[in-house]
Image (cartoon, rainbow, N blue to C red):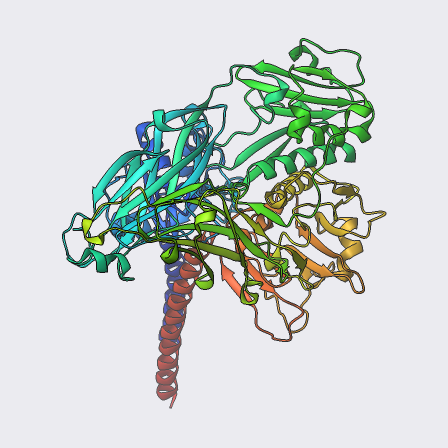
């Protein structure tokens, strides 16, 4: 071959190689540009809550959509490029202050790619008549009816378009949403209505300071045994004894059904309320057989729930109304508390606001709660603040009419209507926690009838409830008294959670207090109890007990380890009646008093893991054996994490406890919870005791007992580890995170009613993208869990970038293969030409 021609061919190959590389780069760019960007406003477990936010945005004229990606995600606009989305972000944050940008696949931006289960929505609100396919689902039994919006609290996506996100609650900041205070309550457990006549009740309490608005309803999800027989089968819903709606179910198939029942606000009482569901249900032409047929049933699903919205109606503002207005519950948000502190609050100040946080958690047992720590200099005009200190700061003095030279006092002021400030002042910092415990005691607090109260040390004494509690009245468990009417069978159902760290003793029992009709046939009338589908006992009713009867049922041994009791009290009232009559004879009745009790003597479990959390830090409904530990150089992030943990633990207490707070020196022999960053001296001092310790040189957690943490997961982790102390009955919990904001990666697993249910083993790791891994280092098995949290949107970003990279590598490999083939062919021909 001519050398000149050879050189030309070599040049040609070089050009082909260069063009191929450039082309592959352009294809990668094109693949990246084919993605879309969206502003995520919120992520919900319940569709109805996503639709509420969607409706607010669309009413304001902003195009938004709902996309189902495991949960229900509300996107504020979908944009072709990041810069356009970034320009729209400030407007979006007027509605959700923690809204942030995410990258989504181009296909996911189109309506055709979205799951048919949840079509793209733009303006439609909840349709009360929607069918079974649109029914809401409940992901976890621990979840309450007030689904929180989970969004990132961090800043916008960085240069690599990967957001550092957390499961932080969004705060709706527009005026319309902020004023929408709401109360939500799940039924919680399924109610089974059996026989021709069935009934079940849900109880709820309306606070005396609430003015209920017209938005009040009960979302009813149910299913019934369907045979096609038309005998007028129906469901009636009563509110406080008055019927408010009835509807037929004959023609509804055997699937799940939904109906929204509007609750007239005039029928809602201040204080205790009862929603009673009554059923008349037939499956054959033989009414007598229908009443005894186990195939005749209606199930009211536990995801049914009450929703009512309200305004504050305080006619006065004095200290006796505490914790209002500081404790408020808004639609789709956790309860928020705002504390004002000096730049570096003392331990006494921190312990005081911990006590206030504990009282808040005790009062709001079934809703998430979050505490904001604001430095005095950063105070805003649109929040209800609680300030704690040894003297009134000069910045706050203008807001108070009375600021005296007294050494110990509580003062309250409407500094910017409708917002208020509560100031707790004591020149003796050791008395500050005692003042907070006084505010948590309703008897002591009821004596505070003004907005300015002074006192001395001896005033800070109040009665403390006994520690151990074994007897629980139905009224304490949220149940009212019930009247069951009609002959034959009827039942009442009660649901009781048993603390995870309890093992019941042999004396455990249920004590029923009853009254019943005097016209029944006593020889054939009885009461029986079933717990968790296990028969416990039956007793004949007696004439001498008609006016007041007390019947005790011992709880069998095979129920002593249960985590919950589903109790069914079944009444069989016999008499002279004809079942073919088809009407309820109200002369046959039984009354179950809410003074009935559960007697639950117990012993604590010996071994604990994270699935028992909040045990052992809460024991016998108090936290007196708990101590919290901070590093000497604690930050406001540490304090916020501490408050949220205390608030969650306090869901389980019956009184505000005398827990303690220390720094890293002089740690007592108690159940300790350490809260700190991975770089602190406190963490370094405990590191060697951890189940999985940290290597400060590699900045990664070390593998232990064949439990491997692989790259890139083993970077920038937060962790919670439950540590056993050899020879001690006490345990420690280490909560550690990478930096000041990274505590929010681990926080949901220790403070959120839904996420806590995921805990297991003795060690959990969570990374910035929402992946978590759980270990039990006491087990020999090498298995572990590496699970993706559905709620975190950054995993979607990861998948997009991985897919682009994979496509690029495939293309590049094919091009290189083609070039190699060309070179081989040319080289072969060159050799032949030489020969």
Q: Observer-nearest residue: 728 or 769?
A: 728
Image x and y of residue 686, in percent: 77, 56
625 left or right, relative to 54: right
Query: Where is 299 relative to 409, above or below?
Result: below
Which residue of the protein is positioned furthest toward the front in this rendering?
544
Split into 4 quadrants, where in the image is the C terminus? bottom left
Residue 282 seen by the camera: yes
Q: How many marks?
A: 0
Residue beneath the point at 27% across and 44% down: 585
Find residue 377 and report its image quarter. Answer: top right
239 left or right, relative to 257: right
Image x and y of residue 626, in percent: 73, 48
Which residue of the protein is positioned furthest toward the right in this rendering?
666
Query: Where is 439 relative to 667, above or below?
Result: above
Q: Observer-nearest residue: 132 or 528?
A: 528
Query: Where is 243 relative to 568, above or below?
Result: above
Which residue of the protein is positioned furthest toward the top in this rendering?
401
Q: Observer-nearest residue: 44 or 596?
A: 596
Query: Where is 83 relative to 417, above or below?
Result: below
Residue 340 seen by the camera: no
Find residue 444 and report its image quarter. Answer: top right
Residue beneath the point at 52% across and 56% down: 564
Q: Observer-nearest residue: 50 or 95?
A: 50
Split into 4 quadrants, where in the image is the N terminus? bottom left
Image x and y of residue 587, in percent: 31, 42
Image x and y of residue 629, in percent: 75, 46
């Amino acid at each position: 071959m001519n050398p000149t021609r050879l050189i030309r061919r070599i040049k040609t190959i070089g050009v082909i190689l260069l063009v191929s590389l450039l082309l592959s780069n352009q294809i990668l760019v094109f693949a990246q540009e084919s993605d879309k960007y969206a502003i995520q406003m919120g992520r919900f477990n319940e569709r109805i809550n996503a639709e509420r936010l969607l409706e607010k945005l669309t009413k304001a004229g902003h195009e938004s959509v709902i996309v189902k990606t495991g949960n229900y995600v509300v996107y504020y606009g979908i944009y072709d490029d990041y810069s356009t989305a970034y320009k729209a972000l400030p407007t979006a944050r007027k509605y959700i202050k923690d809204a942030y940008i995410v990258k989504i696949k181009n296909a996911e931006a189109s309506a055709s790619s979205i799951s048919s289960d949840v079509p793209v929505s733009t303006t439609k609100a909840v349709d009360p008549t929607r069918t079974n396919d649109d029914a809401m689902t409940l992901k976890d039994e621990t979840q309450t009816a007030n689904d929180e919006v989970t969004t990132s609290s961090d800043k916008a996506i960085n240069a690599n378009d990967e957001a550092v996100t957390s499961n932080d609650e969004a705060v709706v900041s527009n005026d319309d949403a902020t004023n929408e205070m709401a109360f939500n309550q799940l039924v919680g457990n399924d109610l089974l209505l059996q026989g021709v006549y069935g009934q079940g009740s849900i109880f709820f309490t309306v606070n005396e300071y609430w003015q209920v608005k017209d938005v009040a309803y009960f979302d009813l999800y149910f299913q019934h045994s369907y045979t096609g027989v038309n005998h007028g089968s129906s469901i009636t819903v009563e509110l406080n004894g008055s019927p408010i709606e009835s509807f037929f179910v004959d023609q509804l198939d055997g699937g799940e059904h939904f109906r929204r029942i509007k609750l007239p606000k005039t029928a809602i009482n201040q204080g205790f309320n009862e929603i009673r569901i009554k059923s008349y249900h037939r499956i054959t032409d033989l009414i007598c057989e229908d009443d005894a047929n186990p195939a005749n049933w209606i199930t009211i699903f536990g995801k049914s729930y009450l929703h009512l919205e309200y305004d504050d109606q305080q006619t006065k503002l004095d200290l006796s109304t505490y914790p209002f207005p500081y404790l408020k519950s808004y639609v789709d948000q956790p309860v928020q508390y705002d504390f004002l502190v000096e730049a570096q609050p003392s331990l006494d100040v921190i312990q005081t606001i911990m006590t206030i946080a504990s009282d808040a958690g005790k009062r709001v047992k079934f809703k998430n709660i979050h505490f904001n720590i604001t430095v005095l200099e950063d105070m805003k005009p649109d929040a209800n603040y609680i300030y704690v200190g040894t003297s009134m700061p000069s910045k706050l003095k203008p807001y108070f009419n009375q600021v005296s030279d007294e050494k110990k006092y509580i003062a309250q002021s409407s500094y910017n209507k409708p917002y208020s400030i509560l100031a707790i002042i004591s020149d003796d910092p050791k008395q500050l926690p005692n003042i907070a415990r006084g505010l948590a005691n309703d008897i002591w607090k009821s004596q505070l009838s003004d907005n300015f109260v002074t006192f001395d040390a001896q005033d800070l004494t109040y009665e403390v409830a006994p520690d151990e509690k074994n007897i629980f009245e139905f009224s304490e468990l949220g149940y009212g008294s019930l009247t069951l009417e009609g002959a034959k069978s009827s039942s009442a159902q009660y649901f009781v959670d048993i603390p995870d760290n309890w093992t019941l003793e042999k004396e455990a029992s249920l004590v029923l207090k009853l009254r019943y009709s005097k016209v029944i046939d006593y020889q054939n009338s009885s009461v029986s109890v079933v717990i968790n589908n296990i028969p416990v006992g039956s007793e004949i009713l007696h004439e001498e007990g008609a006016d007041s009867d007390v019947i005790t049922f011992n709880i069998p041994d095979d129920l002593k380890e249960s985590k919950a009791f589903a109790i069914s009290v079944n009444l069989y009232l016999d008499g002279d009646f004809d079942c073919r009559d088809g009407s309820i004879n109200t002369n046959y009745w039984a009354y179950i008093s809410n003074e009935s009790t559960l007697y639950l003597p117990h012993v604590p479990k010996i071994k604990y893991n994270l699935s028992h959390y909040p045990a052992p830090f809460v024991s016998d409904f108090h936290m007196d054996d708990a101590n919290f530990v901070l590093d000497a150089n604690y930050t406001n992030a540490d304090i916020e994490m501490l408050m949220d943990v205390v608030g969650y633990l306090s869901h389980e207490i019956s009184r505000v406890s005398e827990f303690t707070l220390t720094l890293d020196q002089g740690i007592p022999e108690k159940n300790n919870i350490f809260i700190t960053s991975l770089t602190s001296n406190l963490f370094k001092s405990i590191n060697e005791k951890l189940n999985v310790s940290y290597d400060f040189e590699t900045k990664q957690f070390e593998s232990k007992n064949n439990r491997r943490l692989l790259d890139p997961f083993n970077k920038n982790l937060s962790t919670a580890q439950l540590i056993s102390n050899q020879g001690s009955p006490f345990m420690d919990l280490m909560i550690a995170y990478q930096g000041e904001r990274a505590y929010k990666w681990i926080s949901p697993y220790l403070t959120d009613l839904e996420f806590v249910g995921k805990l297991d083993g003795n060690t959990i790791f969570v990374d910035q993208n929402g992946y978590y891994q759980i270990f039990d280092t006491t087990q020999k098995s090498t298995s572990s869990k590496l699970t993706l949290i559905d709620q975190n949107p950054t995993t979607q970003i990861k998948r997009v970038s991985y897919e682009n990279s994979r496509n690029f590598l495939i293309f590049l490999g094919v091009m290189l293969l083609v070039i190699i083939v060309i070179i081989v062919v040319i080289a072969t021909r060159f050799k032949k030409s030489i020969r």
